[in-house]
Image: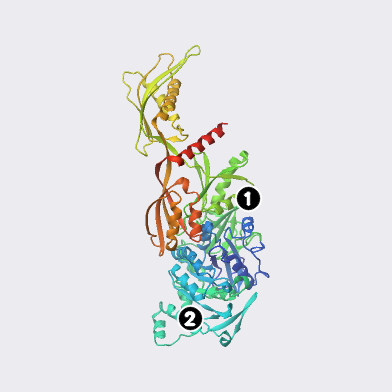
Amino acid sequence: MSDTHDKSPKGTRIVALLGPQSSGKTTLVESMLLASGTIAKRGKVNDGNTVSDTSAEARARKMSTELTPVRMNYLGDDWVLIDCPGAVDLVHESHQGAMIADAAIVVTDPDPARMVALGPIFRFLDEHKIPRILFINKIDAAQGTVKDLLAAAQPQSSRPLVLRHIPIMKGQTVSGYVDLVAERAYQYKLDQPSERVSMDVAQNAAAPEARREMLEKLADFDDKLLEKLLEDSLPETGEVYQHLTKDFTENLIVPVLIGGAEHQHGVTRLLKEMRHEVPPAAVTTAKRGIPAGSLAGQTFKTIYAPHVGKISLMRVWRGSLKDGDTLGGHRASNLQDGAEPKLAKGKVAVVDTGNVVALTKIEVGHAGDIATNDAIQKAKQWIEPPHALFSVAVSAKDRKDDVKLGDSLRKICDEDPSLSITQIAETSELILRGQGDIHLYIAIERLKRKFDLVIETKQPQVPYRETIKKGVNQHARHKRQSGGHGQFADIKVEIKPLPRGSGVTFGDTIVGGVVPKNFIPAVEAGVMDNTVRGPLGFKVVDVSVNLYDGQYHDVDSSDQAFRTVGRMVMTEGLPQCEPVLLEPIYDVAVYVPNEFTSKVQRAVNQHRAQILGFDTREGWSGWDAIKAAIPEAEMRNLITDIRSISQGIGTFEAKFSHYQELSGRDADKVVQARKAALGAAHG
């Protein structure tokens, strides 16, 4: 970060490691740090001693739970590796890391059946024009040949997958690889760089054909190379490298490398690929549309640390940020290394172009915001948080923490914009929403660790409502005499059902002043009081109440008396109107790869869904959209069922549609549970 860094002509470059959970991204980061000489010994996820995954939540779960920038220097080039979570619940966190990267390394298991999980990752990278390398990890445990793996992975990528290496086999074990560009063979050595061996030793008869296929894919983007191949004139090795670099930088191809990070296999080759082909920050800056100016940086992650407060992780896209510079109209001081996972190395003097910095005591906006010398502005290209898929009702275990709860939840949602918090007036519940149960419980664990706040959770209440199926004319009288002025009010109303969505209406057709006009608002207030909770225990909707007759007393009638009788007339009248329960229905679109469509449809049906139709998912090759109407009560575990069938990548979007009548045993259970809850609350 200081002047001793960034001596390479390309400056600091950033690579984000993406991939499905358990594909080995954190282990690959460790192996890259070891190969570059940054660390002397590779840590292990199970031992909880890796450079990234430093949080208590990550180490307890033995998985990445937040993006972690890590610094290294390899052969004089400065790098920041961003280790991104692979869990589908944490996809937004991964996307934030990728959005400030010059390229991505997509890490995958060597299992053809799991290649479908690459589809959403590749699509995201396509949308944001991020070049990527596919690294097939754990190659020693491959389920099939590399050719099989590529055949399974290619449908997930809109760009051609260009195989750079093919394995050398020793019996059923992968013992090394052949570099198809250099036409050299390398033997794996445990926890060491691979050793070059002669091509004769490799004895890989498939190499010439595989190299020809690689060249043919490159020739699709260069007519001169195509002409050479048609004339059986093979290009020089240097020319092939030039084609690979050009096509990668322009995001035309996806190079494919193989290895085994756990044993240091193929890691040095990956580092060399990065060194030659990943574009510098200036190229990425132009693609991102960063505003002009002498200095521009973009916040990509907010962290709240105990005893420190808000920390903003930022990439400097243009210029150099120095201690004391003006950023976003404020003086920047206390610059810290943003690629030191524990943020424990103290101050740095200068942050050069392409590098990352951790900023404290200065407001530079939220994730995605761009800061120049004198302004903070929203980015033209940034990611929207995904739709919420799972929710819990939260409350502080200790009531004295209620005020603290709101502020702490705001900070947690600032750290992770894919979390959201909503206060539901109808149920008086505070609802925390996110991408799944793992996502929300990680957030709750962070609340305990960072803010010493113990949270209680429960399943959110469904905001059922009730209405009536028939009308009634109802009379009510309130008369009380207790010395002095008494209380008197007498009314007759007509209660009728209204069409769905009409709410509750009140009117009067009083003639002759039998109920003075000044008392009619009090009647209305009393009527509305008793629509908050009807005979079934829920808010009353879609009902018309018309006041058409009544009596009053010159002395004993009052607003209070007429409000009281307004409540009485509803209490006595609504049970005679055949009250019926209403439940909220959502329009849901379930998105899955078409190989899972039939199984997911069956699972969706088990959620009392009304299937409305099928279609292809717009813009997604090989994906279907299942449209359905689903009761809110049935949506709690919907995402869990969808993911369990679709290798974790299926998802859905939901939008409130309408309220629908619920009857029979299901309605009886809801009403009984409501009565029990209300009884306990008043017990």
Rendered location of residue 364, percent (x, y): 54, 54
Q: Which residue is nearer to you in this view: 480 or 665?
A: 665
Alpha-carbon distance for marks 1 and 2? 53 Å
For the view shown, which residue lies furthest in the right direction?
A: 40
Pick out the residue farthest to the top: 484
Whether residue 254 is visible here, answered yes or no, is no
| Amino acid at the residue labelled 1 | Lys
Mark 2 Cα shell of 10 Å, populated few (<14), some (14-19), many (≥20): some
Q: Position of residue 246 (x, y in %)?
A: 46, 75
Count the marks: 2
Kind of residue sitting beneath label 2: Ala
Residue 68: name its quadrant: bottom right
Q: Quadrant of residue 527?
A: top left
Q: Quadrant of the C terminus?
A: top right
Q: Which mark is residue 312?
A: none
Which quadrant does the N terminus fall into? bottom right
- Residue 64 lies, with reference to residue 559, above or below; the image says below
Q: Position of residue 133 (x, y in %)?
A: 51, 71
User: Residue placed at 59% from the left, 68% from the top?
Assistant: 28
Q: Does residue 583 show up?
A: yes
Q: Is residue 218 left or right of residue 66?
A: left
Q: Earlier in the sequence, mark 1 or mark 2?
A: 2
Residue annotated with mark 2 = 210
Q: Which residue is mark 1?
A: 450
Which is closer to the viewer, label 1 or label 2? 2
Q: Quadrant of residue 36?
A: bottom right
- Dot 1 falls on a residue whose secondary structure is helix
Relative image position of residue 341 (x, y in whole percent): 62, 61
Of 250 and 40, which appears nearest the observer?
40
